Image (cartoon, rainbow, N blue to C red):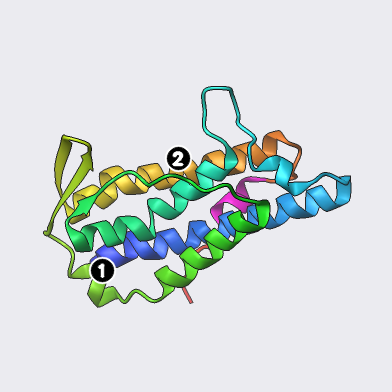
Amino acid sequence: MAISLYDVTVAGYLQTLGAVAGVLDKGLAHCTETGTDPNALVGVRLVGDMLPLAFQIWSVQHHSIHAIEGCKAGVFMPPGAMPEMTYADLQKIIADTRAELGKLTPDLVNALEGRDVVFQLGDFKMPFTAENFLMSFSIPNFHFHATTTYDILRSKGVKLGKRDYMGKMRLKV
């Protein structure tokens, strides 16, 4: 059996987004247990020159559903200005992204294979095929930001382990 573009993108995004949702849920539970305001986590950074938790969630969304939309349009650009967000907003972004990805069909995503996609930042452009853009640019960015989300919450005492990051695996049934 060949692995399809849908399998390596949408199915993988959904698995990791489910894990990110669980990590955020555990973060909220930790705040409740410790009497901490969950909104205090929104601006937390691992180190001073890294972007905060809110940006990590914003980017997880951008490098999943918006990456697929970019492949459809033929151009992908960095996300626009990030609005101020609460912890509940972060959870909603993940839930909404999962819902939007869940609407995509394998036929729609697999039909993107071979299409031209340009990553554009101002006048700077990087040409890709859809599958190379997704697999060599978008997916690595997606996982970087999902991992950083986990790391930020873990650094604040949220009890997380590797299994939390992995999410629901796609086991043979």
Name the image quarter holding residue 29.
bottom right
Farthest residue to the top: give it. 48
The magenta stretch spans residue 84: no
Instruction: Determine the residue positioned at 57% across, 47% down.
Output: 84
- Could you tell me what secondary structure mostly forms the magenta stretch? helix
Amino acid type at circle 1 is Val
What residue is disc 2 on? 144
In-front residue for pair 160/100: 100
Name the image quarter holding residue 105.
bottom left
Instruction: Determine the residue positioned at 87% across, 45% down.
Output: 34
What residue is disc 1 on? 109
In-front residue for pair 70/6: 70
One can see residue 163 in this view: yes
Q: Earlier in the sequence, mark 1 or mark 2?
A: 1
Q: Residues within 10 Å of mark 2 (few under 14, many from 20)?
A: some
Name the image quarter holding residue 104.
bottom left
The magenta stretch spans residue 165: yes
Q: State the image coordinates of residue 83 (x, y, percent, origin top left).
A: 52, 48
Distance CA(mark 1)–CA(mark 2): 23 Å
Magenta segment: 161-167
